[in-house]
Amino acid sequence: AQSVTQLGSHVSVSEGALVLLRCNYSSSVPPYLFWYVQYPNQGLQLLLKYTTGATLVKGINGFEAEFKKSETSFHLTKPSAHMSDAAEYFCAVTTFTGFQKLVFGTGTRLLVSP
Amino acid sequence: GAVVSQHPSRVICKSGTSVKIECRSLDFQATTMFWYRQFPKKSLMLMATSNEGSKATYEQGVEKDKFLINHASLTLSTLTVTSAHPEDSSFYICSARGQGSNEQFFGPGTRLTVL
């Protein structure tokens, strides 16, 4: 079984500051890892994903994440926050077997102040 | 590409009535569709997984007779909330995955309010 832990239900940064959202996973088989963003009353939009290959993955809107197997982590970063980045962010894990059900973390709300 | 739509986006109904929510993949064939429920300020809870032409697989604790799922074609899945009660009020989100793909594409969600 897989699980995801997102540390910090809320993260506050100033505009222009570094964004770091933490995600740790648990999986007995090689994981596929995803970061999604959700704006109020909307569905989820994929930011980036890791399946195989390069452990540093770049996504949309300047976000990137690094898969660290030794730390079972997949933290999301962005060098400089914009006001438009304020949203809910979900980390998710699945595997390549079966129906590939996504298991989501509890989410982190990113607040960006001027 | 890879657009998933949901209809309706919002629905308000009276207690005891049934509500049907549609999930469509607009530009790809979705061999697998997923239905999630999201409580306010909470994460997504997977309710069920459906494959085209097969019965849905429900997660533990989800009443299959309460939440009827049909995946009759490769582009359409429906979720029917039967005899809805106020505690069924929630944000329901579907996602779709094409054959051989490791990515799910999410619909915009449906806000259900049961009075």
Image (cartoon, grey):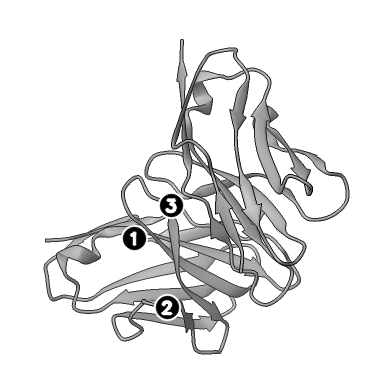
Which one is nearer the viewer's eye here, A56 or B30?
A: A56
State which mark lies toward you, 3 or 1: 3
Outermost residue to the bottom: B54
Q: Give above or below for A81 relative to B72.
A: above
What x and y, as percent, mark residue A99? 64, 75
Are marks 1 and 2 in one subunit?
yes
Q: CA distance from mark 3 to mark 2?
A: 17 Å
Report x, y in % for residue A48: 69, 44
Q: Quadrant of residue B92?
A: bottom left
**Which residue has dot 3 on it?**
B43
Q: Residue at x 61, y 43 (%)?
A: A23
The vertical placement of B108 against A65, above or below, is below
Disc 1: which residue: B8
Residue shown at the point (43%, 46%) measured from the top left: A42
Q: Residue A103 shows which numbered tag?
A: none
Which label's residue is closer to the chain start, 3 or 2?
3
Compare marks 1 and 2 and give the one earlier in the sequence. 1
Q: Quadrant of residue B25?
A: bottom right
**Amino acid type of the residue that numbered disc 2 sits on in the rendered structure:** Gln
Identity of the amino acid at label 1?
Answer: Pro
Instruction: Name the residue tied to disc 2.
Output: B60
Q: Secondary structure at mark 2?
A: loop
Instruction: Check the image and report above or below for A34 versus B6.
Output: above
Question: Total of numbered circles in the picture?
Answer: 3
Q: What is the residue that sits farthest to the front in this orientation?
A: A70
> For the residues marked 1 and 2, what is the alpha-carbon distance in whole angstroms?
27 Å
Chain under disc 3: B
Q: Amino acid at mark 3?
A: Ser
Mark 3, residues whose alpha carbon is within 10 Å: few (<14), some, or many (≥20)? some
User: Looking at the image, which residue is at 43% across and 62% down?
Assistant: B45
